[in-house]
Image (spheres, rainbow, N blue to C red):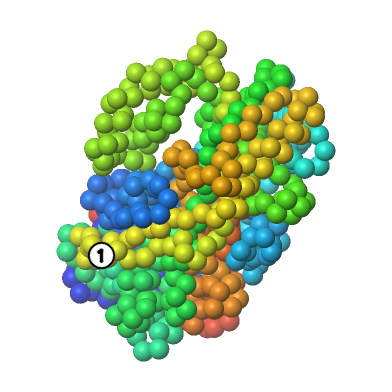
């Protein structure tokens, strides 16, 4: 059942077993895991079924660190969450991403890759992926195309990597009917949680307060609460819930909001394939992202990385390096304009919400955008200008890279958020050394030539540095409550009934897209909550206070 929260009578108290706050990939994966189970579940979504300007504006905030996308544009506040603006890349974290590495400050998970493997495999079905296989040679054989061959790399320092691409699965659209027809899950749209109440010693959540943009208010009391609102809104809500706990819920050690991470990406340097007719298609991000290379019913993309042994020997972070075809009109401003237009077309963004400077840039870049779009769409040879390298690296978890509360307030009275994105020197060195090592190995294998153009360690980051909209780390996982906000089961330290799902719990994040790991962790958390309930008397199957479902847009 899906209900408009504006139809809940003011002052109502709804009771349930499990309350999930946030209906993105984590929240919907959790809810589905409880479908047709002996649990009463309430799923709360701040937005509507489609993008809404008023709801999206609640994301507005201040960025005071490295250049970052406007905070109300880098997320999607409607049913399905950030799956609405996701590109679809999926690859599990590497085994060594979970390890403590002495050259990566604050690294190490309290769980291992082995603990997530069964959940990664289950996540494949939710994300509409192919077989649970990431061996590059297997995929090369399955693809079976002469124009999609992997480079043979010399030595044992570099390697080919494979990602599977989800269609991408828009969770709100794909699972809407299933959620609507559930007999034990009730979803409320337009339901903004403005406070987590944890009175007394703060060991237990007693209720959450919900407010709508139309002024409605009600509360939800549950046995178990799961916060699944992303790497920025999660710390915002925890810190703003300070009526009973002055420092915020779960923030007894001043860790909530710290260690904010996003994957830095930099398009610099070039790669010239010796045999582009054989190799370029499988590596070209502009070709693989729309589905140019497929096998086993799924889109496939290849890129380059460094072996774990090389990362250890060179003391580098994890990394992935794409080839990106270039065309006439190719410059950062034109690409930014194309990106904004593409987001608007696919409903992941709105041109009306863009700043004046963004709109002015798009107008000014229209001639370049037209030529560039023709090259990207039609792959016209006479417009082609070779291949650039786009390198994405693992960010260092730094305590001063953080999310805090700002001074302004939104329409709900919630403090605006302030994000300070910081990077260490390790990221800069990793980008440059990755390009250098890759160039040496490709040239030795006579596969092509790499031109390195990444900044040195003593140089500033160029203006073209960007993030990937992967908001991670702000409620990190650790066994020691002085080092993390949640434990290995994603329960908030010092609290009995509050859990956190999503990428905010990542202690480190490797170099790959986080969505598949978000879903895997959510499925693992669902199993853990079921186990907790099975140890008690099974709750009676029932329903929350009934509301008539209404058509929502």
User: What is the secondary structure assignment of the residue under circle 1?
Assistant: strand
Quadrant location of the N terminus in the rendered image: bottom left
Residue 345 appears at what percent x and percent y?
A: 35, 32
456 relative to 539 in the view: left or right: right
Residue 437 appears at what percent x and percent y?
A: 72, 39
Residue for badge 1:
407
Residue shown at 29%/53% (left/top)?
60
The answer to whether residue 230 shows anywhere in this view is no
Q: Is residue 366 above or below residue 188?
A: above
The answer to whether residue 108 shows anywhere in this view is yes
Snapshot quadrant of residue 114: bottom right
**Mark 1 closeness class: few <14, some 14–19, many ≥20 residues within 10 Å:** few
In this rendered view, identify the residue nearer to me: 532 or 180.
Answer: 532
Residue shown at 40%/66% (left/top)?
235
115 relative to 383 in the view: left or right: right
Residue 216 appears at what percent x and percent y?
A: 19, 65
């Amino acid at each position: 059942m899906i209900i408009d929260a504006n139809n809940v009578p003011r002052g109502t108290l709804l009771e349930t077993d499990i309350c999930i706050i946030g209906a993105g990939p984590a929240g919907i994966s959790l809810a589905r895991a409880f479908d047709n189970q002996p649990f009463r579940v309430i799923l709360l979504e701040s937005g509507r079924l489609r993008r809404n300007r008023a709801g999206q504006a609640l994301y507005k905030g201040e960025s005071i660190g490295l250049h970052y996308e406007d905070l109300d544009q880098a997320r999607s506040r409607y049913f399905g969450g950030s799956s609405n603006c996701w590109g679809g890349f999926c690859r599990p974290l590497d085994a060594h991403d979970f390890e403590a590495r002495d050259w990566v400050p604050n690294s190490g998970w309290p769980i291992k890759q082995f603990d997530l493997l069964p959940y990664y495999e289950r996540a494949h079905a939710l994300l509409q992926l192919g077989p649970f296989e990431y061996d590059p040679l297997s995929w090369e054989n399955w693809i079976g195309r002469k124009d999609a061959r992997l480079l043979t790399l010399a030595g044992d320092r570099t390697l080919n990597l494979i990602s599977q691409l989800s269609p991408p699965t828009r969770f709100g659209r794909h699972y809407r009917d299933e959620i609507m027809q559930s007999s034990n899950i009730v979803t409320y749209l337009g339901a903004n949680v403005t406070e987590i109440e944890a009175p007394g010693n703060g060991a237990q959540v007693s209720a959450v307060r919900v407010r709508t943009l139309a002024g409605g208010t009600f509360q939800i009391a549950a046995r178990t609460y799961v916060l699944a609102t992303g790497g920025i809104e999660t710390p915002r809500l925890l810190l703003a819930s300070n009526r009973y706990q002055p420092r915020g819920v779960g923030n007894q050690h001043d860790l909530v909001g710290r260690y904010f991470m996003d994957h830095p990406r930099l398009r610099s340097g070039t790669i010239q394939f010796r045999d582009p007719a054989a190799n370029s298609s499988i590596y070209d991000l502009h070709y693989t992202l729309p589905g140019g290379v497929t096998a086993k019913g799924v889109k496939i993309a290849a890129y380059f990385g460094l072996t774990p042994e090389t990362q250890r020997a060179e003391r580098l972070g994890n990394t992935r390096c794409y080839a990106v075809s270039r065309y006439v009109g190719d410059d950062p401003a034109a690409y930014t304009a194309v990106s904004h237009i593409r987001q608007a077309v696919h409903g992941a963004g709105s041109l009306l919400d863009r700043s004046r400077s963004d709109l002015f840039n798009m107008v000014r870049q229209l001639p370049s955008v037209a030529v560039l779009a023709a090259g990207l769409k039609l792959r016209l040879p006479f417009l082609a200008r070779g291949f650039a390298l786009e390198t994405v690296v693992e960010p260092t978890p730094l305590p001063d890279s953080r999310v805090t509360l700002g001074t302004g307030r939104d329409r709900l009275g919630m403090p605006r958020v302030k994000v300070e994105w910081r990077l260490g020197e390790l990221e800069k060195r990793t980008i440059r050394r990755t390009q250098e090592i890759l160039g040496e190995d490709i040239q030795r294998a006579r596969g092509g030539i790499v031109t390195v153009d990444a900044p040195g360690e003593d140089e500033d980051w160029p203006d073209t540095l960007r993030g990937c909209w992967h908001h991670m780390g702000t409620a990190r996982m650790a066994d020691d409550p002085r080092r993390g906000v949640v434990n290995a089961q994603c329960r908030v330290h010092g609290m009995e009934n509050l859990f956190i799902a999503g990428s905010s719990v990542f202690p480190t994040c490797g170099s790959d897209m986080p969505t598949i790991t978000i879903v895997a962790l959510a499925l693992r958390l669902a199993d853990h909550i079921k186990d907790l309930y099975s140890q008690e008397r099974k709750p009676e199957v029932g329903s929350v206070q009934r509301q008539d479902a209404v058509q929502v847009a």
